[in-house]
């Protein structure tokens, strides 16, 4: 049950569906809360504290407006009429990607849903919609052990490609994972 920004005590039935522009605020709230929880101690604290739901909502409205027209799809996990997670995927942006390769750009859950199977359901949706045989990649912060473990459980493996990304003024190592 939702108690404002408190943790979920009980997660009602979760529905996975395509996102629309009306979901922007819910996605933004999950995005900010997830970053602040998952990246604490990894990303600079002042950067995380400055994350802003209204600004992120505006950004998501733009992303969702463009949506499938650019072959980018976003799905939301919804419970009790609230967005509790989301995943976005589209054409791979990697230089060595083949035609038809896809990439998961983002996958975040409200921290209160961690461990309740919501991420598993979102991943199954992506794989099901894009096809079991589709080459799928993603980038994950090297220091994000929880996410790396999750991706390995779902058939992704680090392929040895790494890069540094500036996140909040810190140069952080990212590792590429691939499936198929």
Image (tube, rainbow, N blue to C red):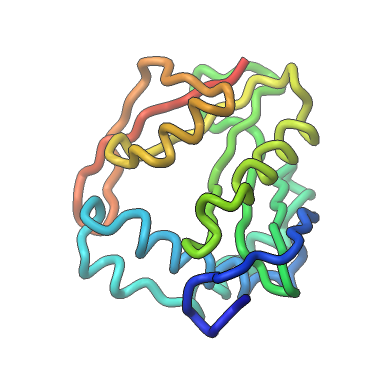
Q: Residue furthest bottom?
A: 4
How many numbered tags mark residues here? 0
Q: Which residue is nearer to you in this view: 113 or 95?
A: 113
**Rendered location of residue 47, percent (x, y):** 26, 66
Quarter holding the C terminus?
top right
Whether 8 is drawn above or below 131: the answer is below
Q: In this orientation, which residue lies closer to the viewer: 26 or 115?
A: 115
Residue 15 appears left or right of 178: right
Task: Out of 23 and 154, give the one closest to the viewer.
Answer: 154
Classify 33 as above or below 127: below
Specify the farthest residue to the front: 10
Whole-percent x, y for residue 57 in the image? 57, 74
Q: Is residue 76 left or right of residue 178?
A: right
Q: Residue 179: horizontal and vertical position, in percent?
A: 58, 20
Q: Locate the N terminus by quadrant.
A: bottom right
Q: Residue at x 65, y 65 (%)?
A: 11
Q: Residue at coordinates 27% horizontally, 36% vertically from top-left?
A: 173
Residue positioned 55% across, 71% down in the render: 9
Left or right placement of residue 160 versus residue 136 in this view: left
Measured along the vertical axis of the image, is residue 132 above or below residue 164?
above
């Amino acid at each position: 049950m939702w108690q404002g920004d408190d943790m979920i005590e009980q997660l009602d039935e979760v529905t996975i569906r395509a996102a629309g522009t009306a979901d922007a605020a819910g996605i933004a709230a999950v995005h900010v809360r997830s970053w602040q929880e998952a990246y604490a101690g990894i990303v600079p604290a002042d950067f995380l504290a400055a994350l802003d739901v209204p600004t992120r909502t505006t950004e998501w409205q733009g992303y969702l407006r463009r949506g499938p027209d650019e072959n980018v799809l976003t799905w939301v996990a919804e419970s009790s009429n609230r967005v509790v997670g989301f995943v976005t995927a589209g054409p791979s942006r990697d230089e060595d990607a083949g035609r038809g390769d896809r990439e998961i750009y983002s996958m975040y859950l409200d921290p209160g849903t961690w461990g309740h199977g919501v991420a598993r359901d979102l991943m199954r949706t992506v794989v099901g919609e894009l096809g079991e045989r589709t080459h799928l990649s993603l980038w994950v912060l090297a220091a994000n052990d929880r996410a790396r473990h999750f991706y390995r459980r779902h058939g992704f493996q680090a392929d040895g490609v790494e890069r540094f990304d500036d996140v909040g003024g810190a140069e952080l190592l990212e590792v590429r994972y691939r499936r198929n």
